[in-house]
Image (cartoon, grey):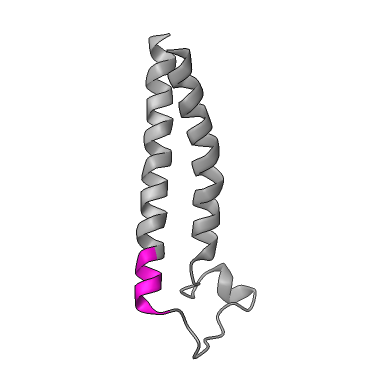
């Protein structure tokens, strides 16, 4: 059981910063803090639709894995 706990802790530590990094890679949509700090300037050289969709899928997948590892770690903690 302690090996599973260790693996889940490592996964949580890896998926957390990776989720943050992937969210920060997204393009600003405007209307929020990105507009306030000059990020609202639109340019013609934007990312392609396929690349943005793949980044969205990767971000959601990593976030779901982070959440599942957090829930799994919580279940393991209550069992011990």
Residue at 38% x, 62% y: name it. Answer: 56
What percent of the width, then of the height, locates residue 2? 48, 14
Residue at 55% x, 55% y: name it. Answer: 21
What percent of the width, then of the height, locates residue 12? 49, 35
Residue 77 is drawn in which quadrant? top left
Q: Is residue 25 left or right of residue 67?
A: right
Residue found farthest to the top:
80
Q: From the viewer's side, name the closer residue of 49 and 43.
A: 49
Q: Quick one: quadrant of the C terminus? A: top left
Residue found farthest to the bottom:
44
Q: Quick one: quadrant of the N terminus? A: top left
Q: How many marks?
A: 0
Residue at 53% x, 88% y: name it. Answer: 43
Q: Is residue 41 left or right of residue 65?
A: right
Residue at 55% x, 36% y: name it. Answer: 13
Above or below, 37 against 78 in this view is below
Q: From the viewer's side, name the closer residue of 23 and 32.
A: 23
What percent of the width, then of the height, locates residue 19? 49, 50
Whether residue 58 is in magenta: the answer is no
Residue 68 is drawn in which quadrant? top left
Whether residue 51 is in magenta: the answer is yes
Q: Residues in magenta?
A: 48-54
Secondary structure mostly seen in the magenta stretch: helix
What percent of the width, then of the height, locates residue 76? 40, 17
Above or below, 66 against 7 in this view is below
Above or below, 43 against 78 in this view is below
Residue found farthest to the right:
37
């Amino acid at each position: 059981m302690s090996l599973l706990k260790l693996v889940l802790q490592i996964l949580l530590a890896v998926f957390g910063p990776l989720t943050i990094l992937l969210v920060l890679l997204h393009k600003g949509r405007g209307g929020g803090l990105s507009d306030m700090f000059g990020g609202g300037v639109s340019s013609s050289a934007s990312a392609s639709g396929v690349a943005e969709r793949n980044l969205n899928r990767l971000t959601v997948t990593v976030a779901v894995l982070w959440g599942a590892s957090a829930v799994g770690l919580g279940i393991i903690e209550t069992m011990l």
